[in-house]
Amino acid sequence: MRIIGGTAAGTILKAPKGFEVRPTPDLVRQAVFNSLAPRIAGAGVLELFGGTGALSLECLSRGAAHAVCVEKSARHARFIRENLELARLPSGLLDLRVQDAFAAIAQMAAASQHFDLIFADPPYGEKNTGRRSASFAQQLLDDAGLPALASPGGLFILGHARRDTLSVPAVWEEAKILKHGDSWMRFLRGAYG
């Protein structure tokens, strides 16, 4: 896994061993960032379920103004800090919050924070044919505070498994879906923003 573009392109990122973290694959990230290229420079970025911090770091490498990366595991957060150093990006550009993503959303919404780009590629949910998804991706879509974090014209990019059939609430408007194998990335806009 590496940073694909920008000032830190080619930097190999560290990830915890085992299956605790499922980093967004390079090919999927490349497709996402090719779609977002003109929107990244100067953007405020939020990454939920940070894992290795790859999405935040990719944005910073490509000229984002600032990123907030939320990761619940203190162990995984150490990898994010190491990856920031490996990428030789200024530490002041990344705010790493070691906490539950949903608690962070509530706190940031209460503080009226806004982001141009919001990324989440949480652990995948189970196949849910014939029933409503209970995955983290569905919980994010249902979270009442998340739409308030999107700046006017901002995007929420949500990763999930193809087998995880999501219900997109009316507060979100789907702009597009990128499909790569089992990985789907949905680009959503606030329907009322």
Image (cartoon, rainbow, N blue to C red):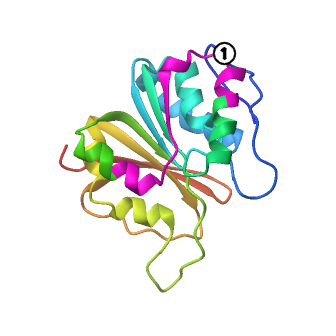
Answer whether residue 75 is visible to the viewer in this image: yes
Occupied quadrant, residue 118: top left
Q: Position of residue 155 (x, y in %)?
A: 37, 40
> Which range of residues does the magenta coloring cover?
82-105
Q: Position of residue 142 (x, y in %)?
A: 34, 64
Question: What residue is drawn where x is 45% and y is 53%?
Answer: 101
Label 1: state its secondary structure.
loop
Residue 94 within the magenta-colored segment of the rendering: yes
Question: What residue is drawn where x is 53% and y is 22%?
Answer: 60
Q: Position of residue 186 (x, y in %)?
A: 46, 51
Question: What residue is drawn where x is 55% and y is 19%?
Answer: 91
What residue sits right under mark 1 in the picture? Answer: 88
Q: Which of 56 and 35 lies nearest the eye of the viewer?
A: 56
Answer whether residue 24 is visible to the viewer in this image: no
Q: Position of residue 73 (x, y in %)?
A: 61, 51
Mark 1 Cα shell of 10 Å, populated few (<14), some (14-19), many (≥20) = few
In the displayed structure, 64 sits above or below 158; it is above
Tell whether 126 sits left or right of 186: right
Tell whether 20 sits left or right of 126: right
Task: Give, as a three-letter code, the residue at label 1.
Answer: Arg
